[in-house]
Image: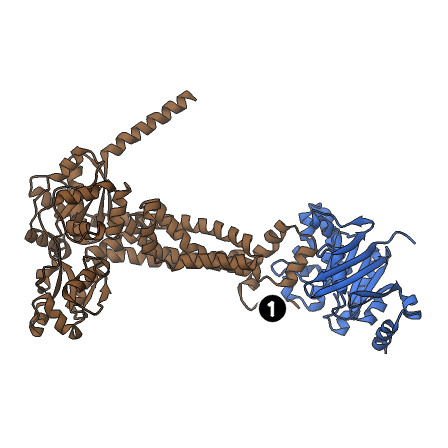
Chain colours: A blue, B brown
Amino acid sequence: MADPAVEFCGVSKRFNAGWVLDDVTLALPEGHTTAVVGESGSGKSTLLQLMNAVYFADKGDVRIQGQPIPKRDLHVWRRSIGYAIQGAGLFPHLSVRDNITLLAKLSRLEAGFIDQRYGSLMDAMGLALELGVRFPHLLSGGEQQRVGLCRALMLQPRLLLLDEPFSALDPMARLALYDLFEQLRDRESVTTVLVTHDVREALRLADHLVVLKGGVVQQSGPVDEVQRSPANDYVTALLTDQLA
Amino acid sequence: MKGLIAALAFVCGMQQTLAAERVIVGSKDFNEGYLLSEVVAQLLEHAGYEVERKFGLGGTLICYEALKHDEIDVYIEYTGTLSRAILKLDSTPQSSELNAALAPDGVQMLGGFGFDNTYALAMKGARADALGISKISDIVHSHRELKVVVSHEFLQRADGWPGLVAAYGFDWYPGGIEHGLAYQALEDGAIDVTDIYSTDGEVARYGLRVLDDDRKYFPEYRAVPLVRNALPERVKATINVLENSIDNEQMQRFNSQVTFGGISYQRVAADILSQRGITATGKSEQSRMWKSLRHNTFVHLELTGIALAAAIVVGVLVGVGVYRTRWLSRAVVYVAGLLQTVPSIALLGLMIPLLGIGTVPAITALFLYSLLPILRNTVTALATVDPVVTRVAVAIGLSRFEQLRYVFLPLSLPAILAGVRTAAVISIGTATLAAFIGAGGLGDPIVTGLALNDPGLILQGAVPAALLAIVTELVFEGIERLVVPRHLLATATRPLK
């Protein structure tokens, strides 16, 4: 197996209320999609935000492609990692186009490259170019989410972090977006970490699974292996309850 | 380098010579103050001095502090005011003793004009007859039927109401009114008794009964030019020509000419001098109305503009600096709110020892008043940006500065602009008070009009100030339309799902 894309080594994180992650050790494979599943409060969203240095581990080490989280210029680190979130979090005062290209412009990328990359992402996400001049509040929830994915992929990130980006959509819009997303992910062959509470979604999009409960990893491995031999009763219950 | 120093020395030397030739004449904000200061000003101009007029300064405190801090060279004061209100003495001593007491402040009285403008209480003659009131002690018995309303300054001064209470045993509290409005209120029957000055031109005109001061409470108020000690002796000698040249009846007549005769105070001042063989030219203000309107409007905009610009810079920077820390932003907004509660005229008065009078303290006061709406709106807007947007702005890799510049400030812009707009309109209104400390602007004609009982003059300040406030509203509305996307203007922005 190639070097892991993401490594957690004995990572613990606490907030005021107590430990959110407890001694997490993980290796997520390069070039694959990993789904982190668990109930709300299981620490899965925190796990994600330790990767792009929004939070910092109280104990242990986080490495991305072998590199530790840097001490300074964190925004440069974060810029190399794509991030999309439930509700999209588009900037309401910027047009669709400006939302997607803001970081590219601030990174002083060449205008021709920005145009070409922007066009290709809009196209891949099935968004008409006319939408580019609109403000986000005029788009449907599904369209907003697609714009959010374009923004996350604009700078060709080495890692893509998705925090429940499909959760708020109605079933039809969600299924349509799964297809578009898979096509684009495969075209870009970007390593992806998807946080979701929906096991069905995890099985649909991911080939590697991490099950979290109360900040403790229950099982981590290829999807078929987890399905074939669940590590404990919780994993079994999680899989059977939701898939029943 | 040597050349530069020599040139600087030359310029400084020149300015000193110019300063020596220039005399700054101040005046209190009532008719007699304007008239007598104008007499002094024209006299000095006749003698060849360059005169700068800072008329209509807001009351004794501001005039005296301005003189003490070399902001003006001379104004007209009254001996009773000097002894009681300024020196806090129980009686009014001789001139020589007064001057000795004033010396530590670097201030000196010159020879008096020759009349005694003492405080007195007055009421309409007919009303006084009906109630059988002829002396102040009569009020003690019938105060329940009387509306006794006195000027704000009289109410506060030790030699005003508080002393009167002690001397006559009043055990109730009167209302307060602006002195310039009191006579009209008497005439209209809105009030029955008020404080007047014994040389007021209104006494005869309104048929007033001056109540006998039967317990001899009111001290002497002889009018004297009050000057800086350091003023050259020849300037003092020039002013001293006026010693003992006007008696009480003459002063009543001169005041009446200005207040009711429709004659400008400049004209009356010129007449007073010409009767004494001095031919000065009394320029009429009337012909220069448009010019002064333009000038006043410009000064007004300058005062508010500079104050507002400074408040925007400081308010937004401080807001950006503190909004992340909850207790700090609360503390800062609280302090700014505290400043807002200090009455403007008090703030202007308090700043004289620090900043003198004129433009600088006026701008400082306006700046302090503008700060709160801008600062509070900035802090609130920044602190209430949608948390999802905030999380994304950090997580996708915008630097601290970029987060502010491209996300948080643009999203807060509508609220910040609304704060600036409020501050601008408040400033334009408040700036009319700047005239009380000689900073000019559209308050100038208002203060002068109030002092000289000239409604036309008041309107020359009040109407443009109101128009300016409306225009400012419109301009800011236009700016908002230009720089804020339409859907962020309305409060009904659909939240992002």
Report x, y in % for residue B495: 62, 68
Q: Nearer the viewer, residue A35 or B489?
A: A35
Report x, y in % for residue B74: 21, 42
Chain letter of mark 1 equals B
Horizontal side of B437 relative to B224 (left or right) equals right
User: Of the residues shown, which amino acid type is indicated by label 1?
Assistant: Arg
Secondary-structure class at tag 1 = loop
Q: Which corner quadrant of the image does residue A43 belong to?
A: bottom right
Q: Which corner quadrant of the image does residue B161 belong to?
A: bottom left
Furthest toward the top, the residue is: B2
Q: Is residue B129 visible?
A: yes
Q: Nearer the viewer, residue B164 or B381?
A: B164
Figure quadrant of the N terminus of chain B: top left
Report x, y in % for residue B413: 53, 57
Q: Nearer the viewer, residue B438 or B442?
A: B438
Q: Is residue B282 visible?
A: no
Q: Say which residue label 1 marks.
A: B494
Q: Which corner quadrant of the image does residue B335 belong to?
A: bottom left
